[in-house]
């Protein structure tokens, strides 16, 4: 008669402990924080490997506003038959950990780039707001919109004009709208734009 495998929590912990031991002294088992009823291996440095039936999944660090990260890597996973703890540990070390390291590094790069872009937009918004209204402080900076990656600055002067700026690309691109100008005011703005265009042509 074929004996059934022991699927009790104790057996699962024993297997996870043995895999952790084979991976190295820095690894230790604990109940999974992402997969109830499973065990994960942690190394004290932010790595989390979840032992699943016939597979091991590496869990990437949690990131705020993950939807704002384009090209975010997925959590790497390998299939491996649990013949023994040593067998699983060998496959994890050879096949999973290199992919995990690459994915974590890519995620860190994306987060750093996103945060830098947001800081750039915030600084541009502050400069515009101060320039528009340095004393009264009436310029309004709208909350950041991470889905679109834009920050807006607006100012309404009585009786006119109304000014609005939309900042993109970390402050490298600004769309400026002005309404309620008189003809003379509009001409002065147009002259400013023309002079800016002339300077750009001289530099190219």
Image (cartoon, grey):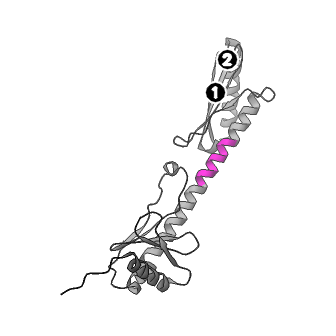
Most common SS among magenta residues = helix
Q: Is mark 2 on a helix, strand or loop?
A: helix
Q: How crowded is mark 1: few (under 14 residues within 10 Å), some or many (20 or more)?
A: some
Distance between the alpha carbons at the discs numbered 1 and 2: 15 Å
Residue 150, percent across and down?
58, 39
Q: In this view, does 63 lie above or below 178?
A: below
Give the percent coordinates (x, y) of residue 13: 43, 78
Residue shown at 55%/52% (left/top)? Answer: 64
Please tell me which residue is depicted at 39% across the width and 77% down the height of the picture. 12
Query: Mark 2 highlights which residue?
Result: 186
Residue 112 figure quarter: bottom right
Residue 164's tag is: 1
Q: In this view, does 159 lie above or below 137?
A: above
Q: In which quarter of the image is the C terminus?
A: top right
- Magenta extent: 113-122
Place of residue 47 in the rendered image (x, y in percent of width and height, measured from the top left): 53, 70
The residue closer to the viewer here, 44 or 2, is: 2
The residue located at (32%, 80%) in the rendering is: 6
């Amino acid at each position: 008669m074929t004996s059934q495998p022991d699927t009790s929590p104790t057996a699962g912990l024993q297997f996870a402990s043995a895999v952790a031991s084979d991976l190295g002294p820095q690894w230790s088992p604990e109940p999974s924080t992402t997969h109830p009823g499973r065990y994960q291996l942690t190394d004290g440095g932010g790595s989390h490997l979840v032992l699943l039936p016939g597979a091991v999944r590496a869990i990437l660090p949690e990131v705020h506003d993950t939807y704002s990260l384009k090209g975010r890597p997925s959590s790497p996973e390998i299939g491996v038959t649990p013949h023994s703890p040593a067998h699983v540990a060998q496959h994890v070390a050879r096949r999973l950990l290199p992919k995990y390291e690459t994915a974590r590094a890519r995620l860190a790069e994306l987060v750093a780039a996103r945060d830098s872009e947001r800081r750039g937009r915030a600084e541009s918004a502050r400069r515009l707001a101060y320039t528009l209204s340095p004393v009264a402080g009436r310029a309004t900076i709208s909350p950041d919109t991470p889905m679109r990656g834009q920050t807006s600055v607006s100012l309404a002067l009585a009786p006119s004009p109304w000014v609005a700026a939309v900042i993109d690309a970390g402050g490298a691109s600004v769309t400026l709208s002005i309404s309620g100008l008189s003809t003379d005011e509009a001409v002065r703005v147009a002259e400013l734009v023309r002079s800016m265009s002339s300077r750009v042509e001289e530099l190219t």
